[in-house]
Image: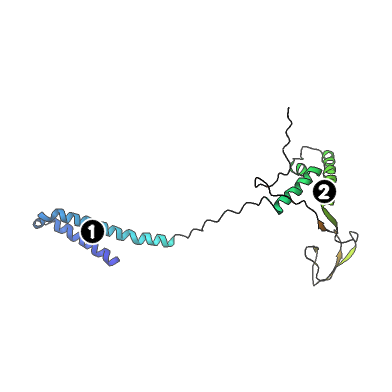
Amino acid sequence: MRVALILGVLLILAVNGAAAAPATEPFRPYLTDASLALSVLVLLGLLLPARQKLARSKPQTEPARPAPPALPATGAYAEIVSFLSMLQEQGRLVHFLMDDINPYNDAQVGAAARVVHAGCKRVLQEHFNIHPLRTEDEGSTVQVPLGYAADEYRLIGKIAGQAPFSGVLVHRGWKTDMVKLPQLLPSAHGQLPAIAPAEVELK
């Protein structure tokens, strides 16, 4: 490619030199056109390798990732929202958590927490059979058996060797062996159910 460019430059010089000679007066318009065409070819020859090099050095753009699918309006997600709705209806849980409690004093927050506690406890007892994982009193020494379930024990402190382990029960843990959530029908408009309806007082 470099040799062709050099030859093109030499041809341009030769054509320009010939155009200046008096004997070539009748051919001067053609020589000028030939000089222009050779100049364009040389220019293209210079630009083409630079463009190819730029294309090779340009980083590959990552293909566009598809948008994550929207949450389905039925099934487990709808049941979760429905359960949250029960906690809101009977314990005002969402109101309590989403409200800014900083303007209230401790006595007011404590009084509201009692209402939330009583209502949410009622919902939990109605839909779950919740009981402690360990029946021993907190602070007593307990054994963590060999082959224990990882979701039933959180070991803290100095952990060395293999189970069984002996330690002090800091928290008894919780588990349930029954879940009774309402079965929801598919939403007519394809959306998750509302947690709590907007309340409008008509006048």
Residue 65 in the image: state x and y as whole percent.
55, 56
Give the class, few, some or many, for how many residues have Cα within 10 Å of label 2's Cα (few <14, many ≥20): some
Left/right placement of residue 170 relative to residue 185 reads: right
Instruction: Kindly identify which numbered label has been placed on residue 173.
Output: none
Q: Quadrant where the N terminus lies? A: bottom left
Q: Nearer the viewer, mark 1 or mark 2?
A: 2
The outermost residue toward the top is 203
Image spot of residue 48 (x, y percent): 34, 60
Few, some or many residues within 10 Å of mark 1 (<14, 14–19, 20+): some
Q: Earlier in the sequence, mark 1 or mark 2?
A: 1
Please give the name of the residue rendered at 70% of the width and 53% of the height, measured from the top-left corner.
75
Residue 141 sits in which quadrant?
bottom right
Amino acid bearing label 2 = Val
Identity of the residue furthest to the left in this view: 23
Quick check: marks 1 and 2 in contact, CB under 8 Å?
Answer: no
Which quadrant of the figure has residue 109? top right
Query: In the image, residue 122 lies at what x, y percent?
Result: 85, 48
Residue 64's place in the image compared with 201, above or below, is below
Residue at 85% from the left image edge and 45% from the top image edge: 118
Q: Give the residue drawn at x 30%, y 58%.
A: 44
Q: Which residue is mark 2?
A: 123
Q: Quadrant of residue 13?
A: bottom left
User: Of residues 185 and 36, which is closer to you in this image?
Assistant: 185
Residue 38, numbered circle: 1
Disc 1 marks a residue whose amino acid type is: Leu
Q: What x and y, as percent, mark residue 183?
A: 75, 52
